[in-house]
Amino acid sequence: MNIRQSIPLGIKKILRPIIVYRRHRGLLENDIFLASYPKSGNTWLKFMISTLFVDKDIGFDEAEELLPFVGNHTEKRLLPDGRRVIKTHEPYRTEYKKAIYIVRDGRDVAISYFHHHKREGTFAGNLEEFVDAFLKGNVDGLPAWHKHVMGWLDHHEDSDILVVKYEDCLMSPTAVIKKILNFMEISVEHEKIEHAVAANTKDKMREKEKISKTALGVYDEKNHFVRKGKNGEWKEVFDDRLNEIFIQEAGEALRLLGYEV
């Protein structure tokens, strides 16, 4: 495994329970969480949701203030009824009383996350080596993708969780936003929804990435934070052997979510 981190992965896993506990202090009963495994479309939805409730276009730096990561949350209330919306990549926790959980085909997630780590300089190996780490839960201290998904879905029936597929958002972002607003029990004019979608297309997100001052670090023209956002990229990138390895480990989660196996 060739993941290079400022803190060795073993130590990071030992410290993680303490770090996660600290991140989850100060939560409120009525907070709403925008949750996903990394690189599943969370940032895109974060931008569209945030844009709905402000009177201007927003960039990465403003979005982080309006809809922050858990652990960076403040008293800032995004929703008009005074509730906060907080982003998280953490596994399911009982503190997450109401959450929107975004899912994406895990093979596309792995490819996008691989390029993310290449961009950050935190992985030196090839895609096959990364997928091995990804499936073993040896990336960023998070559980394996399929365990993260199954953990959230196990609580889908007995918790207030809306599951949203990234692929549905690609096909009809307006419909997905309306579904999310209905789940939040908030009414927003159709024109504002259309504006939020139009203001956060892939090209618009790329431009925002380019001028971000603090949220994304140094801009990299060759390896964008906002990548292709493509559905089914794994069919072009995975060979049969890599796909078989992925299905062997994560096939149950793929089938449960309705993805091709």
Image (tube, grey):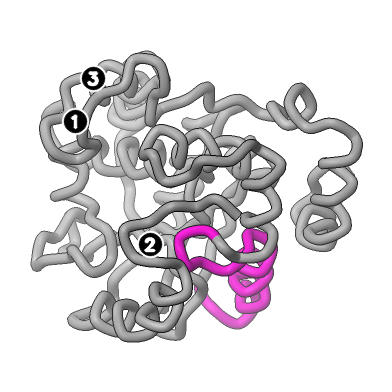
First in sequence: mark 2 vs mark 1: 1
Work out whether residue 178 can be spotted: no
Where 51 falls versus 143 (above or below)? above
Label 2 close to label 3 by CB (< 8 Å): no
Provide the residue span drawn in magenta.
Answer: 139-160
Type of residue at label 2?
Thr
In the picture, measured across the screen, residue 23 lies left or right of residue 140, that is: left
Q: Which residue is mark 1?
A: 59
Q: Label 2: few (<14), some or many (≥20) within 10 Å?
A: many
Q: Label 3: few (<14), some or many (≥20) within 10 Å?
A: some
Q: Which residue is mark 3?
A: 210
82 drawn magenta: no
Where 214 falls versus 92 (above or below)? above
Residue 59 placement (x, y as % from top left): 19, 30
Mark 2: secondary structure: strand
Type of residue at label 3?
Lys
Where 96 falls versus 244 (above or below)? below
Nearer to us: label 2 or label 3:
3
Front residue of 131 and 44: 131
158 drawn magenta: yes
Residue 131 placement (x, y as % from top left): 68, 48
Type of residue at label 1?
Gly
Residue at image position (62%, 74%) is 151
Residue at image position (79%, 45%) is 259
Residue at image position (22%, 63%) is 84
Q: CA distance from mark 2 to mark 1?
A: 19 Å
Rendering quarter of residue 82: bottom left
Q: Which residue is mark 2?
A: 88
Residue 15 placement (x, y as % from top left): 35, 81
Front residue of 253 and 27: 253
First in sequence: mark 2 vs mark 3: 2
In the picture, measured across the screen, residue 80 lies left or right of residue 102, that is: left
